[in-house]
Amino acid sequence: LHQRAIEQERLSSLGLMAASVAHEINNPMSYVTSNVDSLLQDLREEQNLSSPLKEYVDDVLPATLDGIKRVNSIVSDLRRFSRGDFEGYSPYNFDAEVRTALRIARIQLGHVRVEEALDEVGTVVGRPRQLVQVLVNLLVNAGQATPSGGVVRLVTRRQGNRVHVEVRDTGSGMSEETKRHLFEPFFTTKPPGLGTGLGLSVVHGIIKAHGGRIEVESELGKGTCFIIDLPNVPPLPPENPSGGDLRAAR
Ligand code: ADP
Ligand code: MG
């Protein structure tokens, strides 16, 4: 348990650090973005550009904007994902948060059929906003991997003192290579603007912090299933709070 508390503390201070770094990067990035963007617009309106400048307009500046786009989405994901770090453990209604997650992810699921097999789970202890984040990340990934007309299925049920969650899709599936790296921060197979590679590392961190496990089954061309197993009360007692929790507890 002591080891777990240290790990928890480490994860949480990393989260706080990431959040404040992201916050600091956000302001300069917004003027970098708009300056490069207007430079590109202005140059595009120029007739008779010299050939080095033409190369900037055609290649260098668009590539620079792609890079900037990637940094901006990483920064906004870091800020979004670290919000729940400030929250303490508390009892909450699991089923209500599942509905919240479905509502948030719905926009990304417009092209697929969403099947819900939601048994009543009831009250569990944890960080509800982080649970929502886990489900949204998994549902958005499922939606992004699945072509129009496919199916994304969400299953929740209580098994004794544990909670079982499945997010299943009939999408692209994953290669062995992707499976090996998928929980690593910044691992992504998506183009800039679509993916940062932070989603599943955040999911993994949250599930671990809650004393749960996550597994993946996936077959190329057939689809993917993420399976989560969580205790309804995490083994780490709430009176052993990490950095952000102290604040909430006062
Ligand atoms: P991102 O979605 O920003 O790329 P994630 O951490 O959420 O980052 O996912 C990492 C990678 O795992 C994705 O780029 C994708 O290759 C793979 N992946 C995740 N979920 C699925 C899924 N449901 N089906 C197929 N591949 C997936
Ligand atoms: Mg993702």
Image: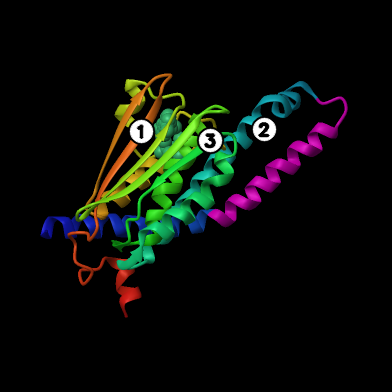
Position of 158 compared to 75: left or right? left
Residue 216 placement: quadrant: top left
Residue 93 vs residue 239: left or right? right
Circle 3 residue? 113
Question: Comparing marks 3 and 1, which lies closer to the viewer?
Answer: 3
Q: Nearer the viewer, residue 232 or 185?
A: 232
Nearest to the observer: residue 212 or residue 84: 212
- Check residue 61 in the rendering and tell me which mark sits there, or answer none: 2
Asked if residue 68 lies in the magenta stretch, the reply is: no
Q: Residues within 10 Å of mark 3 (few under 14, many from 20)?
A: some
Q: Looking at the image, tell me whether mark 3 or mark 2 is earlier in sequence order.
A: 2
Check disc 3 and report its element: helix, strand or loop: strand
Q: Gap between marks 3 and 1, in whole Å? A: 16 Å
Identify which amino acid the numbered label 3 is placed on: Arg
Q: Residue at x 11, y 60 (%)?
A: 2
Q: Is residue 106 visible?
A: yes
Q: Earlier in the sequence, mark 3 or mark 1?
A: 3
Residue to which mark 1 is pinned: 225
Q: Report the front residue among 208 and 112.
A: 112
Question: Residue visible at 50% across and 39% down?
Answer: 114
Give the distance between the C-alpha atoms of the residues marked 2 and 1, in whole angstroms.
40 Å
Q: Quadrant where the C terminus lies?
A: bottom left
In the image, which residues are magenta?
26-49
Relative image position of residue 131 (x, y in whole percent) = 37, 55
For the residues labelled 3 and 2, the Cα–Cα distance comes to: 40 Å
Q: Mark 2 belongs to which amino acid?
A: Leu
Does 34 appear in magenta? yes
Q: Position of residue 208 (x, y in %)?
A: 25, 49
